[in-house]
Image: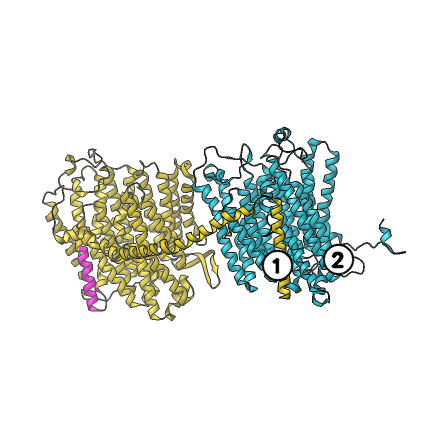
Amino acid sequence: MIASSWLLVAFPALGALILLAGGRRTDAWGHLLGCATVLASFAYGVALFFASDGKPTDTTLYSWMPVADLQVDLGLRIDALSLVFVLLITGVGSLIHIYAIGYMSDDTDRRRFFGYFNLFVTAMLILVLGDNFVSLYLGWEGVGLASYLLIGWYQWKPSAATAAKKAFIMNRVGDVGLALAIFLMWKHIGSVSYTEVFAGIGDVDSGVILAIGLLLLLGACGKSGQFPLQAWLPDAMEGPTPVSALIHAATMVTAGVYLIARANPIYNATPNAQLAVVIIGAFTLLLGAIIGCAYDDIKKVLAYSTVSQIGYMMLAVGLGPIGYALGIMHLLTHGFFKAGLFLGAGSVMHGMNDEVDMRKFGGLWRTMPITFVTFGIGYLALIGFPFSAGYFSKDAIIAAAFAQEETWRAWVFGGAAVLGAGLTAFYMTRLMLMTFFGKRRWTELKSEDGRDFHPHESPPVMTIPMMILAIGSAGAGAFFVFNGQLAEWLAPSLGALQEAEHGVVPHSAVPFIVVGISALGVLLAWLIFGRREIAVERQPVGAVVRAARSDLYGNALNEAVFARPGTWLSRALVYVDNKGVDGFVNGLAALLGGSSGRLRRLQTGFVRSYALSMLVGSFLLVGLLLMVRFA
Amino acid sequence: MPQQFLAQGEQLQVPAIDFAAVLPILIVFGAASIGVLLEAFLPKHQRWSSQIALSLTGIVGAGIALAAYISDAPEGGITTFMAQGATTGAIAVDTPALFLWGTLLALGLASLLMIGDRSLEPGGAFISQAGLQSGGLQTREQANVTGMQTEIFPLTLFALGGMMTFVAANDLLTMFIALEVLSLPLYLMAGLARRRRLLSQEAAVKYFLLGAFASAFFLYGVALLYGYAGSVKLAEIAAATAGSSASDTLLYAGIGLVVVGLLFKGSVGPFHTWTPDVYQGAPTPVTGFMAACTKVAAFGGMLRVLTVAFEPASWEWEVPLWLIAVISMAIGAIFGLTQRDLKRMIAYSSIAHAGFLVVGAMTLTEDGLSSTLFYLLAYGFTTIAVFGVISLVRDANGEATDLSSWAGLAKRSPLVAGVFTFLLLALAGIPLTSGFIGKFAVFSAALADGNAALVVIALVASAVAAFFYLRVVVLMYFSEPAAEGPAVTVPGAFTTAAITLGTAATLVLGIVPAFALNWASAGGFVP
């Protein structure tokens, strides 16, 4: 069973191969194959889940890079952590695939889309299933490639092309970190396999461990859209909505959290790197939530919500043994409700001529009841409504943040997490109110292509996945915490979940604080957006909102720190290349070409001159021989 | 009356022959002789099929005999055709000879397939009556008449047998005879093209005249060496070099002249001048045969002579050969840049490659020997496939070898363009092709032997040569096709097999070269 775990990867890989190599011939049934392969993987994953006891089992497929001392095998590790991810990726992935059949039905290239989708799932599975850091890196890069192809799906739109490039390049920055971390492991431990690296990490100099930890964090920030590499994630909304759902819920952004959870022995050995993870997580969760309050674009709000929620997960896994399992739990519940929210947003867009500006929505609950209900359940889960999925997973993280040993940390990070929860409730309520309630603002408007809006409910192929995800959003959290079964299941991979000590805030008080703050956020949003008319045009705003709408200047920061010096450097290099290197090369080429042109006249075509050339050569050869001898 | 030369009462001595060892050669020559008889007695319409069957059987049979002998060949090799009382025979059968025989037979098979092909040109690439005066109406008419001069098959076999003898010849006289046996059929074959008769005949005459000239050098060198050593046997020349009182002038002039003869056959600059004209004029299958097999034979012979006979004098001939290698590489790389004709371009490429091979041949170490043998094998397969592909691209006047007519070929025929690109990359020495492994092996052997300067020059020459290979690639992929450009003919089974064999060998030797390298380094020359 476990020995043939490669089948998990093989199904979607085969699907991608057939769909991409088969071309137009597969148009008719390509989308069905695309869904079938992921469902097959999911079924196999479920079977594996019940067959496995969660303990790590490594299967080596073949020797991948046997170079002198560097022996890298392509191997798969089946353990609790990877199985959980497999189920998330293939399970939620399957639903999104099915949804995409309906969503992409008008696209003439739907078959290619499913090819890329399968590629995405393949890469993500390689990422989580690899038994060494190089296999992980392979999947890591594959995910980057697939996301590039999918974000830039509407390639004729300059904004989509730019967004795809931006995602790819910002991911590169993170990838460099991961690559350097792998180099360091190889240099200091002599291996890149999980087993040997984790076993040998204790003998390594603490400075090196810190460096590895920080470099891995850089990689995680790139993939998971964490500060300072968060700016690509909202732009990635340029892709079709199923892509957003897949990136945000099932693949890609979860990779960073996975990496840190997977590398937990490394982080356990270096508290400073853990602190860095916590700081990044806490900062990003506030950043995302603040920006999320300011946007009118429904998908952007959800995107920043993801940035913020991943911040929670990072915060959790940065806390060490008291947080790993909590981070993974939040990742799973988030996978359900965020996928549901994105599919709901896609459904709204589907009915609204692809409009994303919430100012043009309003009162849609009547026309799209199923979307409204499923979206609403996702909303409740996200803001942590009592006993929904988010309530269990997020509150646990906040409680753990308050339970840190050092008092200042507990207050700062716990406080940030609570504040984030309030902001989340605010911006999500705002989104709900602007979209589904209030006046039907779209009745007097036309979409950009000049059509009237006729909002309608989406076909069952889209709504059924939404319903399934809604069920998950409602019940997954309770299911996971029941008897602490998720934490227990994950223990072989992440270590046992340590009970948080009673921190600066009593454990039992945390839910009340969080729910209270969240309720405050909801109330505030209702006061501002629920009671008043929402203007269709944008209104003049204050400095804070302006800053938030500029993504808190995240792009400007990247521009100043990375892009501009890079441009200068490349300009300088181009100058040297043009004037120096090219000049030399071109001169040499001209010299050779010129001499070739002149010398070829020697080849006259006359046998007599050929014979003369031979004679001269013979004299040369014999003369030299004699000269060498008698000189 | 041979008895006249024998003293009274003396009997003609028959040399001792190990028939099992030389069976491959005997089979090839036997098939060639039967082929001549077939020409004489069979009606015209039966000749092509029976000649093809005979030649293929001959080559495959020789291959089987070779394989059978290799399976339990004596360690270290033997010499045969041994006169009574002599210590060494006229033919040496050792690892390099066996390797080269295998190479020659495989390349000969591929060439023969191309020579026998009748799908690209009705009736084959050869004229039906070579004797007619060129330029006349009859000649033009018969270009479109089916049927070909089927003597080409026995000629090919004779040439191949000569080459096999040449690489195994253990004395200079045997070597000379083998040289003539391999050369004379080639002169004829070069003049048999069905189209562009004048060019073909010009090529044949040039090749013949210059070949005779080179043979004269070789023979004169043999005479001088005999004068010095009192023997034409390679081993005895080496022994004499160590302790003879005769004038060194004879030795060095002899070495020089013998080497000139060998360099001519290997088309090494500055003895290369015939190469572009002959490659261009000869029928393309014959060009492929010459480019691959003749090169293998010439360098096989050169390796043996330099190692077995001239090794004690290596200090003296090292500098001149160093210079020759540089000249050849430079001529090949630089002249190739401005060629407009594909066959001429490949001719200059072969001159550059000859320079690389000299680098290997003058490296008298075990690695030098094995890497040069591997290089010959790899280069031979690639070249045959290259000429096979060239023969596919045709317009109304036969093959379209002008570079401009290959523009945009990839759009019309991606497969042919892809294969040709791969082969050109192999000639350029790009990794994952046999060309890279060959160059890498030869250059590293030379480097280990302390010839760093030569290796640097060779690398520069490779880089320059890569330019004209890549130019063809760029032309095929990034240029607009000419409006009335040539068409790619779909080849029949024979040419397809030859191209496939060459391309597959180029790929396999590029990815898993170990088996061939191991065989090439299994043993040295028999002393």
Q: Kindly identify which chain the residue marked by label 1 belongs to.
A: B
Marks 1 and 2, how far apart in space?
22 Å
Within 10 Å of disc 1 (Cα), the crowding (few <14, some 14-19, many 20+) is: many
Where does the image place residue A141, in percent across and percent down from the top left?
Answer: 37, 53
Secondary structure beneath label 2: loop
Magenta segment, which residues?
A402-421
Question: Main SS type for the magenta part?
Answer: helix
Quadrant for residue A485, please give it: bottom left
The mark total stands at 2
Of the image marks 1 and 2, the number of the one nearer the N terminus: 2
Relative to A294, is A440 above or below?
A: above
Depth check: give the residue in front, B376 or B46.
B376
Chain B, colour shown: cyan
Q: Is residue A354 left or right of residue B453?
A: left
Disc assigned to residue B369: 1
Is residue B485 rendered magenta in the image? no
Depth check: give the residue in front, A588 or A63.
A588
Quadrant for residue A573, please give it: bottom left
What amino acid is labelled 1 in the image? Answer: Leu
Q: Kindly identify which chain the residue marked by label 2 belongs to.
A: B
Depth check: give the residue in front, A296 or A101.
A296
What amino acid is labelled 2 in the image? Answer: Gly
Where does the image place residue B439, in percent across and percent down from the top left?
Answer: 54, 55
Is residue A416 rendered magenta in the image? yes
Chain A, colour shown: yellow
Quadrant of the image for the C terminus of chain A?
Answer: bottom right
Relative to B58, is A258 above or below?
A: below
Within 10 Å of disc 2 (Cα), the crowding (few <14, some 14-19, many 20+) is: many
Kindly tell me whether residue B371 is visible in this rendering: no
Residue in view at x 16 percent, y 48 percent: A429
Report which residue position mark 2 lands on. Answer: B89
Where does the image place residue A20, in percent across and percent down from the top left?
Answer: 40, 42
